[in-house]
Image (cartoon, helix red, strand yellow):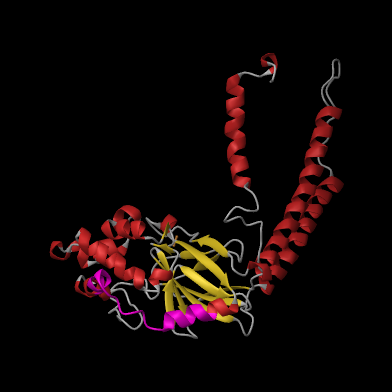
Amino acid sequence: MANRKHIRPKSLLVLLALVILPILAACGTVDSAQTTINPQSDVAREIQGTYAFIFWVSVVVFVVVEGALVYAVFRYRRRPNSGMPKQTEGNMVLEVTWTIIPALILVAIAVPTWITIFRTDDIPAGSYIINVTGHQWWWEVEYPDVGLVTANEIRVPSDRTIGFHLETEDVLHSFWVPALFGKIDLVPGRTNTVWFTPDVETEGQMFLGQCVEFCGLSHANMRMRIFVDSPDDFAAWTAGLQSPAPEPSGVAATGHELFSSKGCTVCHSINGAYDAAGLFPAPNLTGFGSRVTLAGAIMENNATNLTAWLDNPEEIKPGNIMYKEAEAYKNPDLALTDADIGALVAYLQTLQ
Ligand code: CUA
């Protein structure tokens, strides 16, 4: 045990902990879900390479500048009986030198940055294209080649370069899965792009991401997941969503009827079952039962959470359009009873 005599005052330790803990927390480990320093795609590695280069240049600058400072402080410190030091004013050589050196460092940083920007700019020809549309507060994900629309969970084949076309239905959002690609804004009236090729060893893995542009009340509840599937798994997934959902029976059949009688179909489409009028943008629920998460990928998709979500979506995701606009929440005549919610949960879970 430590000898108590040598321990500094408690308050100092607490202060030290307060300063150090947030710093350590920010560092995390390479296993941290959304760390930027564990790239797992070609594009993320390019960005990481640029970052590492700039980091080490900064380390050299730091060591040289601080070293010179510390040296000067000690070497030229005031000593007893040392009078007024020699006064100088202006030094052309010194000033030119300390202007040119930083300028050269900036050029050395700018050139690889530009190279990375241009190299990662355009989606390579032959990429697998996925259209992503930002909404307050969820991501619409469209696979144009197979005519599928889903939300928040993006499945990609591991053997292709993936290109995203990014648009927004309302305000600015920003699309980011740190391990796979850099941040890219979704700007009203524009189509932005980003792409990546997953590393071979990412097959079967899931990557976390989220909106990184403040976009309103539930900005923090606008998350996403990218699943890198084997080509076979990906083909099976798209085929599964293209085939009609099984005919619901029992309580799920009741839920199936409620889904339309309570007005859910005004906004939610389900391939082969309902085609929404599109009054308000809402996630397409095709294959909803096979999704891992719900409500903008903020919670696990299970019966308990889905019940809580349908019971009071406002509590889970403040400001969401469903709570504001859906008749089931606005119109007391259409309000959902516990039994209704149970039936809807049963029906939604059949959507595999
Ligand atoms: Cu969308 Cu923040």
Q: Nearer the viewer, residue 80 or 129?
A: 129
Whether residue 227 is visible to the viewer of this picture, yes or no, is yes
Question: Of helix, strand and loop, which mostly describes the magenta segment?
Answer: helix
Q: Nearer the viewer, residue 336 or 350?
A: 350
Q: Is residue 248 magenta?
A: yes
Q: Residue furthest left?
A: 333
Q: Is residue 134 magenta?
A: no
Q: Is residue 112 left or right of residue 239?
A: right
Q: Nearer the viewer, residue 106 or 311?
A: 311
| The quadrant where residue 245 appears | bottom left
Please give the name of the residue rendered at 14% of the width and 61% of the height, measured from the top-left corner: 332
The quadrant of the picture showing ligand 1 is bottom left
Please give the name of the residue rendered at 61% of the width and 55% of the height, measured from the top-left corner: 35
The image shows residue 140, relative to residue 94, as above or below, that is: below
Please give the name of the residue rendered at 52% of the width and 61% of the height, measured from the top-left corner: 209
- Residue 63: x %, y % from top left: 80, 43
Q: Is residue 208 left or right of residue 54?
A: left
| The quadrant where residue 41 appears | bottom right
Please give the name of the residue rendered at 54% of the width and 77% of the height, measured from the top-left corner: 234
Q: Nearer the viewer, residue 343 or 269?
A: 343
The image shows residue 305, relative to residue 270, as above or below, that is: above
- Residue 24: x %, y % from top left: 62, 41
Residues shaded magenta = 235-256
Q: Residue furthest front?
A: 250
User: Which quadrant would the C terminus be assigned to in this image?
Assistant: bottom left
Q: Is residue 259 left or right of residue 141?
A: left
- Residue 110: x %, y % from top left: 72, 63
- Residue 13: x %, y % from top left: 61, 25
User: Which quadrant would the N terminus be assigned to in this image?
Assistant: top right
Whether residue 193 is visible to the viewer of this picture, yes or no, is no
